[in-house]
Image (spheres, rainbow, N blue to C red):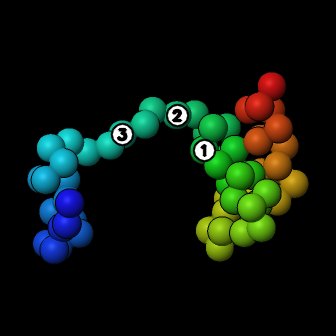
Amino acid sequence: MEFDGEIFKIYQIIGSVPYWEHSDDEEYALYGIAVRRGMKPYDMPLSVDEALEKLDAALL
């Protein structure tokens, strides 16, 4: 499948907009995944250590 249109119109092709209800802790755990993969997002709202703590807590 190819899509040559403008990227913001992709949802018209898909037919829905993806949405995930999540808590702040779950979102922060995603930052922990990025840190574990060797990245540090520039807009991370918590420290590296806090992100890793949230990830560890989510895995329990």
Label 1 or label 3, whichever comes before in sequence order: 3
User: Which image quarter is the C terminus in?
Assistant: top right
Is 27 drawn above or below residue 46 in the view shown? above
Around disc 3, counting alpha carbons within 10 Å, would you say few (fewer than 14), some (14 to 19), or many (20 or more)?
few
Which amino acid, mark 1? Glu
In the rendered image, the quadrant that contains the N terminus is bottom left
Spatial CA distance of label 2 from label 1 is 7 Å
Residue holding disc 1: 27
Residue 55 vertical position relative to residue 47 in the rendered view, above or below: above
User: Label 3: which residue?
Assistant: 19
Residue shown at 77%/41% (left/top)?
Answer: 54
The extreme front residue here reads: 1
| Neighbourhood count class around disc 1 (C-alpha, 10 Å): few under 14, some 14–19, many 20 upward | some
Question: How far is mark 1 from mark 3, CA to CA?
Answer: 13 Å
- Circle 3: element type: loop
Q: Secondary structure at mark 1?
A: helix
Q: At which x and y percent is residue 42? A: 65, 73
- Residue 6: image quadrant is bottom left
Residue ID for mark 2:
22
Residue 59 drawn at (x, y percent): 77, 31
Q: Residue 53 location in percent, x, y?
A: 84, 43
Q: Residue at x 36, y 39 (%)?
A: 19
Check whether the beta carbons of the residues at disc 2 and disc 1 lie within 8 A of each other. Answer: yes
Q: CA distance from mark 3 to mark 2?
A: 9 Å
